[in-house]
Amino acid sequence: MDKKETEKQPPSWRDCTPSQKRVLLGIRRCGSCTREHLGTILGLPASSVSREVSPLLLEGTLISDPPGVRRRNAQLSVAPSLAYAIGVEVGFEKVRALAVNLRGEPVGVVKEYRPDRRDAPAFLQCVQKVVREILAQPYASRVLGIGVGFANRGLWNPAQAFAREREEGKGDPLVHALEQTFRLPVRSRSDAACAALGEHRSGKLRGVDNGLFVLYLEGIGLGVIAAGQVVYGEWNDAGELGHIPVDDDGDYCHCGNIGCLETVAAQWALVKRARQIMQGGGQVNFRRIPNLNSLQISDLCAMAATGDQLARNMLAKAGRALGRALAISASLFDPAAIILGGDLMDTKAYGPMIAAMRENFQTLTAHRTPQPIRFEVSALGNDATVFGAAELVFADLLA
Ligand SMILES: [Zn+2]
């Protein structure tokens, strides 16, 4: 962006007065709206709405479609460059980050880094590096804050590494370190909660008051939207779907419990089980994998796709368990929709798992809902968590 373009920029969010912010927030919530609709939202007569809106249009804080300051039925929307937020996803193996403008649109592409070690300092360094790169952009002075979505309770748990000091009452060390480094407000929540927030803001859960988001990655998380709000829980621990106990006689889980959903349905559990079966000399097609240790979940999905009965059965068993856990969740939250995120978006590879999940879910919930709960694939895809993490900043700091 050259100097000329910078001069054309509208004022930033920080320059707006409280009453202007009220108008802008009302419009942002709808995406775009007419003056009449804005008046209804804000409880203001038409004359007051015009008094507020006209100067904002003149200075470019609001945008009119079609253009013009006095078009009564024009759609009004906020200027995207008024403010930005940085969304960061701290996963089990990588850090991803994206800058998002006030309209919830991405600015540039998602940046992704893999720390060379799985420990807190290495992950912190990665987060700092990626945030520094984003803050080198011309819009840096308009960044309101940094949102972080954490993978929780994994075999290696990035959140846990940072949580120890939090439990000792020293606050969240990652949040603290980022605030110190960048002098910006930082908010952090679980990745599934962020994904649900992102999808609620600009994906398939937009306008939905009650919905669930299944984040199926290395772990299995659930983002919950209830009464229009994300449910975070007392300790940021709501939605730990993967650790719902589904089998009293099941395997031990890395969380310490027995028979958690993850021990039946997580990728790590399926890979572990497949290796055990192969070591025992099981199933014909399994023997085509030359090195047991190199077996990945993608191999299992590929074998199921070619008709390998054991691979199909393993995925279907995982799907039934997931369907049962979601049926329990549906009984608790009465959702209108369940969004499939993470690797479940690959409906072809995970076909046998998804089919069994839906079938069992349907059987277990058929009695209770007047119409079937709809299943859909995430609109935001792999970026749901970074979008939602950025939205954490807007949701908290704009209000
Ligand atoms: Zn567990």
Image (cartoon, helix red, strand yellow):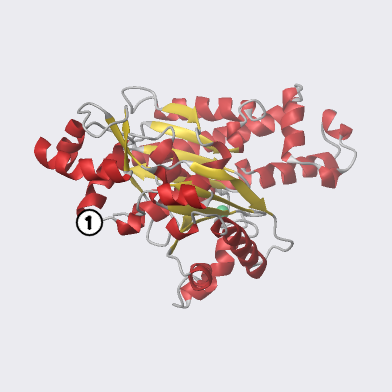
Residue 171 rendering spot, x and y as whole percentages = 45, 73
Ligand 1 under 8 Å from disc 1 Cβ: no
Determine the quadrant in which ligand 1 lies: bottom right
Residue for badge 1:
18
375 with respect to 160 (left or right) = left
- Where is 201 relative to 366, above or below? below
Q: Residue at x 64, y 70 (%)?
A: 121
Residue 256 place in picture, x, y as percent:
58, 60
Depicted 32 relative to depicted 250: above or below = above
What residue is drawn where x is 15% and y is 36%? 40
Q: Position of residue 142 (x, y in %)?
A: 43, 56
Element under disc 1: helix
Q: Quadrant for the C terminus, please.
A: bottom left
Query: Closer to the camera, 366 or 81?
Result: 81
Q: Is residue 2 visible?
A: yes
- Residue type beneath disc 1: Pro
Left or right of residue 52, residue 96 in this image: right
Where is residue 353 drawn, in percent x and y? 61, 30
Rendered position, 295 above or below 154: above
Q: Nearer the viewer, residue 361 or 390?
A: 390
Q: Which residue appears farthest toward the front when viewing the image?
A: 4
